[in-house]
Image (spheres, helix red, strand yellow):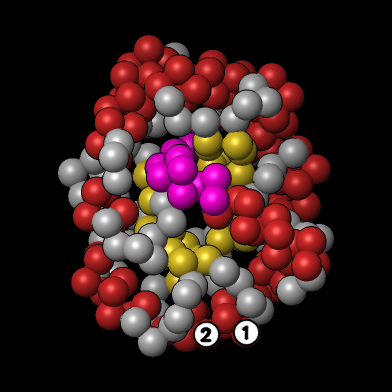
């Protein structure tokens, strides 16, 4: 891995360790992006992973990076190199994928873009280590065996870090974050799609504050 990208990864990981929670956002209307970003900031979470599960993703990322510059914006559910290109052009600072697609991962690394590729087995970890990735996404975390599975799987693999996502919520996030190999957790419970679509951003701020409280002191 190029030194510049390694330094970018290191800085990103330190930031995510401080934030602890990465809101995973599905947004249908890009016009909702800026008020959503402001609601997250007001709730104390200066981060958002905008998933490419809708056609509004790239536009939403662009609006957030322009209008809410204090927000760390990444792209999630990145399934193709073309989506990675669109996300980078829109201003995304990191990528997240549900699985480990070598073509997508290698494309992101080639353009010096940090990617947290999804794994839930040792083979995925070894593919990551082959590329010198310092961290991966553990997905779907709960369905794959939860923290017990993660601890067992991580044991042989040195210092690689994990971002559990999938089934993580306010009740179990503290147990994940207590494991030193977890850098942060991804979750959508504080950014439910129905509240975004209905414009109830005050409720999102309240849920975000609760999420921050759940991880405070960890």
Q: Which residue is mark 1?
A: 130
Residue 190 vs residue 8: left or right?
left
29 is higher (above) or lower (below) than 172: above
Residue 70 vs residue 215: left or right?
right
Give the image location of residue 180, x and y in percent: 35, 63
Give the image location of residue 10, x and y in percent: 62, 58
Q: Residue at x 30, y 62 (%)?
A: 179
> Exactly how many numbered labels are in the figure?
2
Q: Which residue is mark 2?
A: 126
In-front residue for pair 187/131: 131
Q: Residue at x 54, y 24 (%)?
A: 37
199 is higher (above) or lower (below) than 207: above
Q: Is residue 1 visible?
A: yes
Q: Residue at x 59, y 30 (%)?
A: 71
Q: Residue furthest left?
A: 171
Residue 195 vs residue 108: left or right?
left
The answer to the question of whether label 1 and label 2 lie on touching residues, with beta carbons closer than 8 A, is: yes
In-front residue for pair 117/216: 216
Tag 2 secondary structure = helix
Tag 1 secondary structure = helix
139 is higher (above) or lower (below) than 85: below
Q: Is residue 51 visible?
A: no
Crowdedness of circle 1 by 10 Å Cα count: few (<14), some, many (20+)? Answer: few
Give the image location of residue 170, x and y in percent: 24, 40
Q: Residue at x 56, y 40 (%)?
A: 50
Quarter holding the N terminus is bottom right
Quarter holding the C terminus is top left
Magenta stretch contains residue 135: no
The span shown in magenta is 14-27
């Amino acid at each position: 891995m190029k030194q510049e990208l390694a330094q970018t990864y290191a800085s990103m990981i330190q930031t995510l360790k401080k934030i602890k929670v990465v809101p995973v956002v599905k947004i249908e209307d890009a016009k909702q992006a800026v008020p959503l970003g402001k609601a997250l900031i007001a709730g104390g979470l200066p981060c958002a992973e905008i998933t490419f599960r809708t056609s509004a993703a790239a536009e939403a990322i662009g609006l957030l990076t322009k209008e809410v510059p204090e927000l760390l914006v990444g792209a999630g559910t990145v399934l193709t190199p073309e989506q990675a290109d669109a996300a980078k052009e829109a201003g995304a600072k990191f990528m997240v994928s549900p699985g480990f697609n070598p073509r997508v991962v290698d494309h992101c690394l080639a353009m010096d873009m940090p990617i947290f590729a999804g794994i839930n087995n040792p083979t995925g970890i070894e593919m990551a280590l082959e590329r010198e990735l310092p961290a991966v996404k553990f997905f779907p975390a709960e369905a794959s065996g939860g923290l017990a599975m993660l601890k067992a799987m991580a044991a042989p693999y040195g210092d690689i870090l994990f971002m559990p996502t999938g089934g993580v919520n306010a009740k179990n996030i503290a147990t994940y974050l207590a494991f030193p190999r977890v850098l942060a957790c991804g979750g959508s419970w504080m950014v439910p799609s129905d509240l975004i679509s209905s414009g109830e951003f005050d409720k999102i701020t309240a849920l975000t504050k609760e999420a921050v409280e759940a991880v405070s002191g960890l």
